[in-house]
Amino acid sequence: MRQSADINHIYDLLLQSDGICTDTRHLRPDSLFVSLRGAHFDGNRFAADALKQGCKYALVDDLSYIDAVEEADLRERLIYYKDGGFEALHELALLHRAKSEATFIAITGTNGKTTTKELVAAVLSAKYRVHATQGNYNNEIGVPLTLLQVRPEHQFVIVELGASHIGDIASLCKLAQPQYGIITNVGRAHLSGFGTPEGVVKAKSELYAYLREHDGQAFCNGEDKTLISNLNGLPTVYYNGTSSPRITGSVLPTDETGLLKIEWRDQETGESYQLATKLVGDYNLNNILAAITVGLHFGLDPKTINEAVTNYQPHNERSQVLPPTAQGNRVILDCYNANPSSMEVALNSYFTMDSQGLNRMLILGDMNELGDAAESEHITVIRQIRSYLLRYPKMVTYFCGPNFFALQGHYGNEHFIFFPSATALKQYFTRHQPQHSFILIKGSNSHHLSSIAELC
């Protein structure tokens, strides 16, 4: 009977391979395939196929999947690890992390963590060799995969940490072992897992707790009293606020593009700077200030930092301003994720922007993972929009998703039109394409609202 492989042996095999993968839909030739098992999937079933498609080795946690393979060459390259793929992934990440001499910066928060991660990476990349979380690979699978992509030449590693339950951030910190950290903000999200807003605060603050225990340091918005109250003596560099901030900043009036412009002041030198960005939304001010503060802390000059921020181009359907459409529409696409906090600030920002004479239109999808608070939080969004109807009497909002659709009987009218799904809304728009409108598209990624933008 084949014995379970030692994790150090598996790590040696990883070093002989060209990276690691967990999904046969996105294989890399000569990589190590790790079979993951969950409630509704079993990666062991695809291990032999991964080898046939070009993987160098494949890890399984069930000997029957090795015994079922007839080809001797494939059987030799199937590696048995009894503790399973998830455990192997984490153990491999820890071994790899221990070999890196890079500076690790962890970023979490209810909103803005991905944008902040990308801005910090853009700024530091102007001087250093930087590796950062790809997309939002920020969970118990994504973080170890991020760590396993670190190379000896990397000087900084920017790791995004996500959470949906208390304890998630603490576990991910044990893997990433950051020396620095940023919590962008704390708001209402994943309430089905955190239970209460207080649970969200407790969960996100696990990053501060790790940094305190390991002589780390934080970068913090000096105007966020919730974050400040949870620092508890952690050495901190502030941006904005009154607690001796490294920099301060404010939003400048926008031009016809609606893109965010800011002014920031270096409190050590007294110099002020203005810069234009390719982002929309006043809510991105603090994300930018965090990146500037990190850049200054690690020795970048203001000119280089400003150029990096100005050149940063948002993607992944986050705060994206799309080119004017053939139908004469201006579209803001912000539909990678949505929760009550991000929905509120996105709407507030949208209503401060100049529509340039176009009709205002909102296309909003459900906010997920809110548990018992789902109905009340979706009603809050509707009421927020309703408060603007006196100012914009021609505005129409299209809602889609089961949570919003359930409210149709109480709130449906000529201003509020409800659909059970994005598919149903898309079918409607194929017959009634928006014309000459200023459109915000916002909702959770699972509703695939980006497909609606193609019709605008």
Image: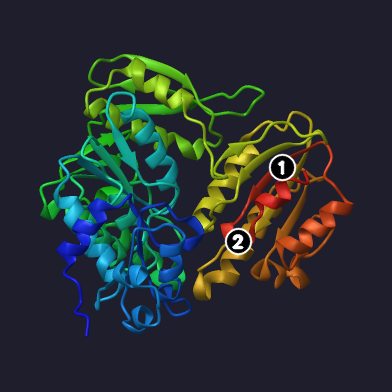
Check if mark 2's residue and mark 1's residue have beta carbons within 8 Å: no
- Report the residue marked by disc 2: 380
Q: Position of residue 342 (x, y in %)?
A: 52, 51
**456, above or below 16, in the image:** above
> Left or right: where does residue 84 sit relative to residue 439?
left
Give residue 85's position: percent from left, percent from top: 31, 70
In-image side of 340 versus 90 (left or right):
right
Asked if one can make out residue 358 in the rendered structure from this viewpoint, the answer is yes
Determine which quarter of the picture holds residue 392.
top right
In depth, the one of 217 and 79 nearer the eye is 79
The picture quadrant where one finds residue 27 is bottom left
Vertical comparison of 242 with 382: above or below: above
Q: Is residue 139 visible?
A: no
Badge 2 density bin: few <14, some 14–19, many ≥20, Cα 10 Å? some
Tag 2 secondary structure: helix
- Count of picture labels: 2
Identify the element where label 1 is drawn: strand
Residue found at x 84% / y 57%: 428
- The residue mark sitting in front, 2 or 1, is 1
Residue wearing tag 1 = 439
Q: Residue at x 19, y 79 (%)?
A: 3
- Rendering coords of residue 146 (x, y %): 33, 51
Q: Amino acid at mark 1?
A: Ile
Kindly identify the amino acid type of the residue bearing the numbered disc 2.
Answer: Thr
Q: Residues within 10 Å of mark 1 (few under 14, many from 20)?
A: many
Q: Quadrant of the N terminus?
A: bottom left
Measured in 3D between alpha carbons, the distance from the residue under mark 2 to the one under mark 1, in whole angstroms, is: 20 Å
